[in-house]
Amino acid sequence: MRAWIPFAGVGVVAALAGLSLWLAGSTNLPPPPKAGPVEATSAAIMASKFVDLDGNSRVLGQLTGKVIVVNFWATWCTPCVEEMPGFARLQSRWEAKGVRFVGLANDDPEKVRAFGQRLAINYPLWTGEAAVMDLSRRLGNRIGVLPHTVLLDGDGKVIESRIGIYAEDKLDARLADILS
Amino acid sequence: MQGAGGGFFDAMRRIAGFLAALAVLSFPAGAASTDEPLEADRAFRPSARLVAEAAASGRHGIDIEYRIEPGYYLYRDRVRFDVLPATLPIASPEFPKGQEIDDPFLGKSVIYRDRVVIHLPFMASSVNPGRYRVRITAQGCAEDRLCYAPFVQELPLTIPAGYRAADATTRPLPPGLGR
């Protein structure tokens, strides 16, 4: 009987190794960094002021919808620029369901306009100076990095705050889950 | 003396040990805390050094050395230096050659990885001794993941009494320099 004990041990360990290899293989990207606590009230979020590319003053509360996707980005931030075409596709896909995307950048409005045209961005791109990163920090971006994407409900309540790239398929699934 | 059965069990123990190690090493990356991005002050660590080389070279000023964590890089053209108070004027920074990258969206940029020393030349051959601060505004990224909005770092800088630019070779680091 004792002769089988090593075989059983090897079998258990091999199963564990195989399971962990399978789990590792199913994870293509590292998990997103953890966002910090949200320190802004819904009212303060919706009253945050920015400027559109025509120079008009805007507040987030002007975006009416069931879900508002606020994306903090910059024209010099490669990961930000890489994820934006996917956001434009999601805006088209989910617009009829009440999803509104907006891009917020502390950047030169002319550069923002040029990027928006080049990337065929179909959602509003607003700019602001310190207000952009200030809001981002109060929405959980504790280390001041980009991109940062925040999902709000129609009343400005934070549904999710994500640091780093939000992959198109994952955001698509998240929106489907929220709106189901 | 070990019999044939003992050798077999020993081999099994070795295989089990190897597989156990494999299981630990291959555990999903999500379990590792290294996936958390560093704060800017930990990813990009500057220090300052006062230099005064031979009069013939005329090279005198401040060397700013950046130690950059693996997987992170600093943009050359997005680093700005101010010395406060402004009674210690500095000329344009002297940047070493960096790595040129060509991004399909952003065009060409020069970046630094690992370590870089940037020289800030004094504009005058004699400078007033005293306590100063070097304020650095910089931008950088974690490879393929995220970028840091402009961040500010300050380094204390003390210029000792009697300091002269033409004082022979490189001076040692005076007390109070560095972070």
Image: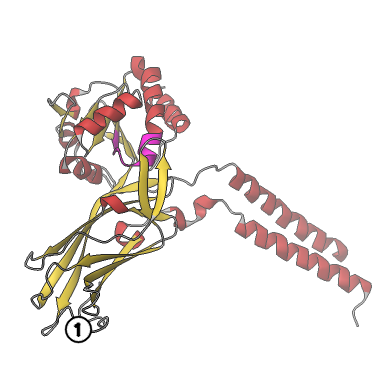
Front-lying residue, B55 or B149: B55
Q: Residue furthest top?
A: A96
* Observer able to see residue A86: yes
Instruction: Based on the picture, tell me whether residue A79 belongs to the magenta stretch.
Output: yes
Could you tell me residue B40's position as x and y percent?
31, 57
**Residue name at image x 40 percent, y 61 percent:** B69
**Residue name at image x 17 percent, y 37 percent:** A128
Instruction: Based on the picture, tell me whether residue B46 belongs to the magenta stretch.
Output: no
Q: Quadrant of residue B24?
A: bottom right
Residue A177 in the image: above or below residue B56: above
Front-lying residue, A133 or B22: A133
From the viewer's perspective, is A61 left or right of B77?
Answer: left
Could you tell me residue A168's position as x and y percent?
44, 30
Q: Residue furthest front?
A: B56
From the viewer's perspective, is B61 left or right of B65?
Answer: left
Q: Assign a secondary structure to mark 1.
A: loop
| Amino acid beneath label 1 | Asp
The quadrant of the rendering that contains the C terminus of chain B is bottom left
Q: Which residues are magenta?
A: A71-82
* Observer able to see residue A163: no
Q: Residue furthest right?
A: B4
Q: Quadrant of residue A1?
A: bottom right
**Residue name at image x 37 percent, y 18 percent:** A92
Front-lying residue, B131 or B16: B131
Q: Dot 1 surroundings within 10 Å: few (below 14), some, or many (20 or more)?
A: some
Residue B153 in the image: above or below residue A106: below
The quadrant of the rendering that contains the N terminus of chain B is bottom right
Question: Circle 1 is placed at which residue position?
Answer: B167
Could you tell me residue B118's position as x and y percent?
29, 64
